[in-house]
Amino acid sequence: MSRIIAVANQKGGVGKTTTSVNLSASLSAIAQRVLLIDLDPQGNATMGSGIIKDEAEYTAYDLLLEEQKCTDIICKTPEAGYDLIPSNGDLTAAEVTLMDRKSRELKLKNQLASVSKNYDFIIIDCPPSLNMLTLNALVAAHGVCIPMQCEYYALEGLTALLNTIEMVRERLNPELAIEGLLRTMFDQRNRLANDVSAQLSQHFMDKLYQTIIPRNVRLAEAPSHGLPITLYEKSSKGSLAYMALASEVLRQRTSHANRATAA
């Protein structure tokens, strides 16, 4: 059974899409079967995977509105090694349409039931808001990866997301857990970044990924070439960091599986 991870944070520009694409590619590089779902109408994860978003025959729009089978929507990425459910601006209309549907928050979960056995990991790139799209991701997921910059306003926005996760856990998905908080675009020369990192370590302890994603020029350049960092510049600090994160995530999955077996 696959481990479904929603990559979420209501604050934009914290590295959600970068993390979704590069974690998917890094997991694929260590022989994991991965499906990446682009659930953001901007379609940046689609473009960063080498797929032209406006040329996709089917997208996450068709997935959520159940207009196509999940297997018919999944496409192969040209080089990255993982499967993809693409997205584009049409997805904005899906959110509006879903408001009138029964069990609207369960659409993604129900669709993934037919394919989850085919993957070790399903990674969901969420939009930068706590809307119906993000809610579908949280209901479908086993865990949430929260990318965040180590700055003052990031801590402020984190509270709202944690409250939402708790609400979803209580009402819709009792299995939902915080997979980990991921420090992104980190500059160790920045005093505030180090102070915030220390606060996160103190408050979240084992919920904080040991891996830290550094601020890295190659990492920022890779999406414009439609490539994950592991293919664009394999030896870069950004690539090495995401490979380390993939190993950490894989160890977590093994730990989850062992606990489930013991129970």
Image (tube, grey):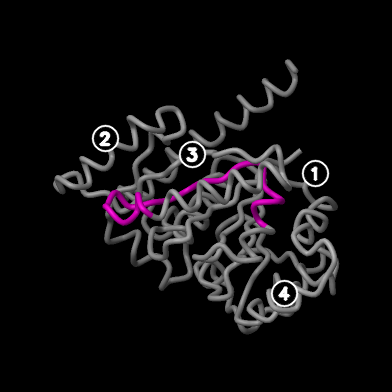
Tell me where residue 95 appears, x and y as whole percent.
68, 74
Q: CA distance from mark 2 to mark 4?
A: 40 Å
The residue that appears at 55% across and 29% down in the rendered structure is: 251
Q: Earlier in the sequence, mark 3 or mark 2?
A: 3
Task: Classify residue 79 as left or right of residue 65.
Answer: left
Amino acid type, residue under disc 4 in the picture: Tyr
Residue extent of the magenta highlight: 137-156
Residue that carries the numbered disc 1 in the rendered image: 117
Left or right of 160 in this view: 185: left
Please report contact status of discs 3 and 1: CB closer than 8 Å, yes or no: no
Task: Using residue 157 as the reference point, say whether residue 126 is left or right of it.
Answer: right
Label 1 Cα neighbours within 10 Å, binned few <14 / some 14-19 / many ≥20: few
Q: Of the two numbered discs 1 and 4 on the same chain, state the one appearing first in sequence.
A: 4
Q: Nearer the viewer, residue 176 or 42?
A: 176
Q: What type is the residue that disc 1 sits on?
A: Lys
Say which amino acid is labelled 2: Ala
Q: Is residue 66 above or below residue 246?
A: below
Residue 180, label in figure: 3
Q: Relative to 94, say whether 19 is above or below.
A: above
* Quarter-of-image position of residue 216: bottom left
